[in-house]
Amino acid sequence: MTETVKKLKEWVDGSDNIVFFGGAGVSTESGIPDFRSTGGLYHQEWKYSPEVILSHTFYESNPEEFFRFYRAKMLAPDARPNAAHRKLAEWEAQGKLKAIVTQNIDGLHQAAGSRRVLELHGSVHRNYCERCGKFHGLDFILRSEGVPRCECGGIVKPDVVLYEEGLDQKTLDNALQAIVNADLLMIGGTSLNVYPAAGLINYYQGHKLVLLNKSPVARDLSAGLVITDPIGEVLSQL
């Protein structure tokens, strides 16, 4: 255990209101590619850029191509929680961790046992008919072909936040409140490029700010601890 990880362990042991703010890098150890690192989703070849395909405008104008990309690149039904997901769930069960604020849509935090998960960008496990509002699970999307349709004939849209769409206000408010109240804020696996999600960390008022990310982030956080090793590898030592 390095000196930095030892310090992190001291901080965690001395905290009872931890909030974890995470991004795609949390799930890379589960085999889900992240978005912006080398080899990530945004560096792969596709007819259109992911930013274009994952926009509301593209979804509306070209749903066939949207769902072809969505099934191929955004769904990972066989992925399982890794050491980071499991450790965070363990801390929550102990009463130390009060919330996970995640930009991920894969549902792996819940699969690991976490209950207080604030999903800023939605979840692939929730899908709804745009006509009748009926809920459909992930299996429905996986079994469907082309543009998925409900029995009523309406298009079934994933409950994920696309570019040009706003975040759910209640989720945003709950995330902000959790961060305001945290005594330790741990940021992991995110480049902090995506707003308004990245702006939430501005509301942290404590003095234990930890950054766990393999590559530099988009802004200077003045974090008390910066660790560039894989998140699961680090958290499993605590």
Image: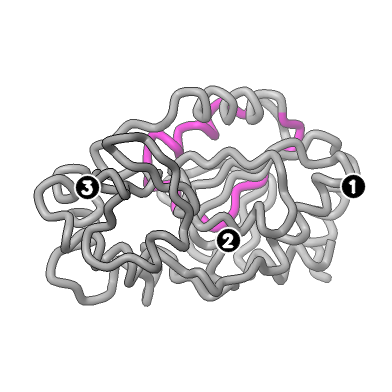
Which callout, 2 or 3, points at the residue further toward the start of the chain? 2
Label 2 residue SS: helix
* Residue lying at 75% horizontally and 36% vertically, measured from the top left: 98
* Comparing labels 1 and 3, the label whose residue is closer to the camera: 3
Q: Is residue 56 left or right of residue 159?
A: left
Whether the magenta-drawn stretch holds residue 188 is answered as yes
Mark whose residue sits in front, 2 or 3: 3
Three-letter amino acid code at disc 3? Ser
Residue 13 - label: 1
The quarter in which the N terminus is drawn is: bottom right
Q: Quadrant of residue 159?
A: top left
* Residue on which the image places disc 2: 26
Q: Nearer the viewer, mark 1 or mark 2?
A: 2
Position of the C terminus by quadrant: bottom right
Q: Earlier in the sequence, mark 1 or mark 3?
A: 1
Foreground residue, 238 or 114? 114
